[in-house]
Amino acid sequence: MIDRTFAALLTSLVLTAGVHADGAMPPQTDGSRFSFHQVADGFLRLDNETGKVALCSRQPVGWACLAAPDDRTALENEIVRLRRDNAILKEDLLSRGLPLPAGTMPVPSAGEDENSFTLRLPNSEDVNRVVAFVGQVWHRLLAALARADSQLMHRG
């Protein structure tokens, strides 16, 4: 509750910072990553790429920016819920014989995460092929060394 109140307070400060013309810095629109807004305790720093807000204030050894807490867990839970609902809707369309809309990714398999991958371990056939290959390379190396030795003996 306190985190949401603090986040709401910081958001309102960001939105109203431009209203107070006495010493407030105008928002930067030159394409830079951060924009700063003056507040009573220092500056609010808005990351224009991620949307994260930090309160920057003078400290005994300079300036420091403290990230404003956000309710990331709630956002991630909502993303999981929406993905699950989306998968259910896709399966419903496919079960009715209807195609998925253009540009829609197919439904991932059950238990499959979009960031996961399957690692296939070698079986005995794979190991036998590698051993045979290494054996061939070894015999070729020995034959090449024997030829080189023979050529050196005939020269000397």
Image: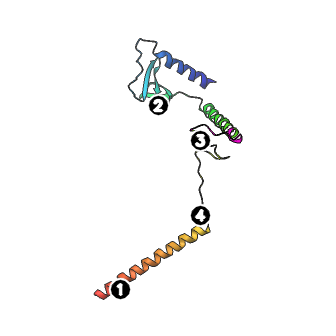
The CA span between labels 3 and 4 is 31 Å
**Camera-side residue of 105 and 43:** 105
- From the image, tell me which residue sits under label 3: 105
**Camera-side residue of 94 and 54:** 94
Mark 4: few/some/many CA within 10 Å (<14, 14-19, 20+): few
Disc 1 or 4, which lies upstream in sequence? 4
Image location (x, y in percent) of residue 101: 60, 37
The CA span between labels 2 and 4 is 43 Å
**SS of the residue under disc 2:** loop
- From the image, tell me which residue sits under label 4: 122
The quadrant of the image that shows the C terminus is bottom left
The CA span between labels 3 and 2 is 26 Å
Q: Which amino acid does label 1 sit on?
A: Ser
**SS of the residue under disc 1:** helix
The CA span between labels 1 and 4 is 40 Å
The residue segment tinted magenta is 93-102
Q: Main secondary structure of the magenta part?
A: loop
**SS of the residue under disc 3:** loop
Residue that appears at 37% across and 83% down? 147
